[in-house]
Image: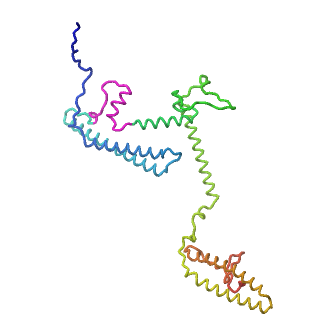
Amino acid sequence: MSSFHNPPTVAPAGPVSAPLTTSGLPVSQLESLRFKASQIIDSIQSLQRTLEAGHTASMPSWPDILSKYNILLSQTHSFSMGLSSTLSGAASTTAQGQRAGGTAPPNVLERVVLHPSTPMSDAQLDGEVIPLLRNQQTTDVLRVENETVRRVAEHMATKGSLGVLGAPSSQPQQQRQGGQQFALGMGAAAKKPVDYTDVLRECEEIREAHDRRVERAVRAVTMLRERFEWRARVEVEVEEPEELEWDPRAIAPVLDADESGEGEENGMDESAGEGEGEGEGDVVMEEEEGGSNDEDEVEALVDSAMDTQSPASPAVTMIGPSAGLVPETGNTLPAESVPRA
């Protein structure tokens, strides 16, 4: 019979790490740095959401991007200043220890740094150490970065870094020529392998093409600005009728005076028609013509009222039965020289 026995306990190989004591640690400064780091992470995510703009093919407004970038820059500067103040405090303690003749104490932050004591693979490092170093995973950022690189590489001739590394694309690489399909992989052996120099050259060409497109757009806008008088189109000295506060009492006396003058003119026309022995049909025709003149006079009065209510309008020229305008010179005629209708 074979006997079973417990094997002796084997001591673990390698040095055993000492427990971390918090007696000599600057806890308040570390908490402040942790809070500032959390603010920086939130600002980066906010800027990322602004740039994504809901995955729409549009660019967000530049003031929003600039404001979020300035916030991120100020928070990073504050974090750097807080870190340097912690180091300066440790340096002053070190200088005091050296002047006293004793050994210089180590840096305070060096005692709180986490690092593995044994070599670890990337998978073990991501699963065991990174959660201790960060309070938030960066897998989302890495995923978005990989998707962005893949989308950009699909529209490049060199396929970007994917072409250099030889990674397969998500879309079939086929080219149509003369109604026939030719796979690009058929001549892959004869083609020169893509390196990072080719990728950088293509990126430079894309940037130059974008700059030329922007230059053409700016030149087109400049030509339009020189061609049209945009200030005259934008700056309106006379307010629109719907924006005015109309007062019917201010226009009623003018209309009454015009109507009384028209009544006298119609009476004179009727008496002249009776003296000449003409029929009543001529009088009716004159009254109809007078009605059309009334509409023109009302429109002229409306225009003149708009000009008088505008503080920036020049001298008003009345157009009606009491005043006239010479088309050639632009001067006004006296009321006596204007023939009455």
Which quadrant: the N terminus? top left
Q: Nearer the viewer, residue 58 or 226?
A: 58
Q: Is residue 131 magenta?
A: yes
Count of numbered tags? 0
Residue 123 vertical placement versus 255 (above, below):
above
Q: Position of residue 113 (x, y in %)?
A: 30, 33
Q: Quadrant of residue 126?
A: top left
The colour scheme used to paint the residues is: rainbow
Magenta-drawn stretch contains 67: no
- Where residue 174 sits: x, y (%)? 61, 30
Q: Residue furthest front?
A: 1
Q: Quadrant of the C terminus?
A: bottom right
Query: For the magenta stretch, what is the residue range?
Result: 109-137
Depth order, front residue of 70/47: 47
Question: Which corner quadrant of the image does residue 86 belong to?
Answer: top left
User: Viewer-proximal residue, 80 or 278?
Assistant: 278
Instruction: Name the image quarter holding residue 37.
Output: top left
Residue at position x 25%, y 27% from top? 17
**Left or right of residue 155: residue 51:** left
Taking the spot 29% from the left edge, 44% from the top edge, the residue there is 32
Q: Which residue sits furthest bottom?
A: 275
Tell which of 106 and 45 is nearer to you.
Answer: 45
Which residue is outermost to the top?
1
Provide residue 42's location: percent of width, then percent of height: 38, 44
